[in-house]
Amino acid sequence: MNGRGVRVIHDTDFQAVTPDAKSKTHFVIVDCVGVCEQELTDSRPLERQPTIAFERLLQAVAFGSIDSDILSSLAGRLVRLNRRLGKPEQQALEKSAGGIPLRTIAANIIASLDPDRQREAARTEAGLPEGVEPTPEQVTLAAQRLMKEAVAPLVTNLALRDQLTAMKQQFEQTIDTVSKDMVLEAAFSEAAREKAQGLVASFEQFIQEHKDEITALQVLYSKPYAQRLRFADIKALAEAIQAPPRSWTTEVLWRAYETLDQSRVRGSGGRMLTDIVSLVRFALHREDELVPFAEQVEERFKNWLAQQENRGRRFTDEQLQWLVLIRDHIAASLGIEMDDFDYAPFNQRGGAGKVYQIFGKDLDGLLDELNEVLAA
């Protein structure tokens, strides 16, 4: 059962059988017949200090602790954290660690705790021949050296420790299965309004303070736009507002504005990353209503089609189907390029070759026009 439990599985395959989880971070063994009433092996779990917070484990290591239980618990949590991180987060940590991946740091810590490795290191350092066991003192010295070397990337790098703590907080979720709430009133309470007011004020202050630092804010502040807003720009903005101590999301900010003035908020926004564009425009008082970005794109698309018809330009049913796909892509990604036709859903309909066949030499100009009109 242990052997099956520790098997790794790709996130996609895991989500297919466990839809409410993102990655396999642990496993549970249900002992129905009492197999585990007595320990049958000498194996121990990595997590040996479950009551100590992740930040305190890092702090203990930074202060020079090489306690095996501390190091084992820290390694286990680093492994679980690495499994939950996306590639951009893993790359950011690797850069902060001087090119050492987080999984390598965790693996080195685990390896330094291996008694066989410690004895082999002691034998090598003492120059003992094969078959001659080192003394306990020699093993202890070798073990201390291995553990200090394993945690060195964490001990000497405060920025990396802070980054690990911040990322851990982003993925933490406390689920209360004991407390039960009772609905007292189906309306926004005064406390909720005060909280929303504080959140909105903090968000608008953040925009003002960082308008010259974050590319997306630089673009949205300029009128007309000095450059075209890119998906990577709004992704960087979203990561900035989600970073501790703020930990904001577009959904939370959207609900805060809705709490303050529901008459000026339309639709359930905040679910798409591009909705952050609507939020910033509304916070800058460039828009009278807070409307999901996809709805704005759809409205502009309808107006554009009407203008084309008035000019005598007609599209076939097949062309309209492709135009709708292009519209939806722009709503989700702020733009479209020829390379995008190599991916879903376009590649399922023939990809770049098919769309070029349908629109011909007008395609490049059409894409430029739609990027300009719909993502404006």
Image (tube, grey):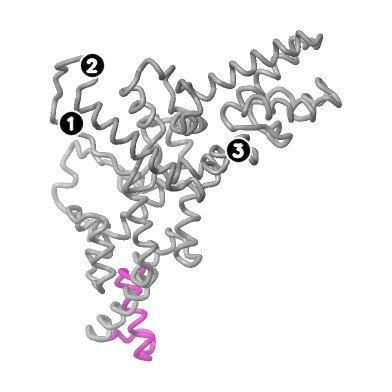
| x and y, in percent, of residue 220 in the image | 55, 37
Kindly identify the amino acid type of the residue bearing the numbered disc 2: Ala
- Local crowd size for mark 2, using a 10 Å CA cut-off: few (<14), some (14–19), many (≥20): few
Q: Look at the picture and state if 219 lies above or below 287.
A: below
Residue 256 as seen in the image, left or right of residue 348: left
With respect to residue 21, does 118 lie above or below?
below
Quarter occupied by residue 315: top right
* Viewer-proximal residue among 287 and 199: 287
Alpha carbon of mark 3 to alpha carbon of mark 1: how far? 43 Å
Is 126 one of the magenta-colored residues? yes
Circle 1 sits on which residue?
177
Q: How would you rate the neighbour count of disc 3 (Cα within 10 Å): few for under 14, some for 14-19, many for 20 or more?
A: many
Name the one closer to the observer, 313 or 344: 313
Residue for badge 2: 187
The residue wearing badge 3 is 229
**Quadrant (top left/top right/bottom left/bottom right) for the C terminus:** top right
Q: Is residue 131 magenta?
A: yes
Tell us which disc is closer to us: 3 or 1. Answer: 3
| Residue 157 drawn above or below residue 135 | above
The tag earlier along the polypeptide, 2 or 1, is: 1
Earlier along the polypeptide chain: callout 3 or callout 1? 1
Q: Secondary structure at mark 1?
A: loop
Q: Which residue shows up at 43% across the image and 32% down it? A: 283
Give the residues drawn in magenta, as a range. Answer: 111-134
Real-space Cα distance between discs 3 and 2? Answer: 37 Å
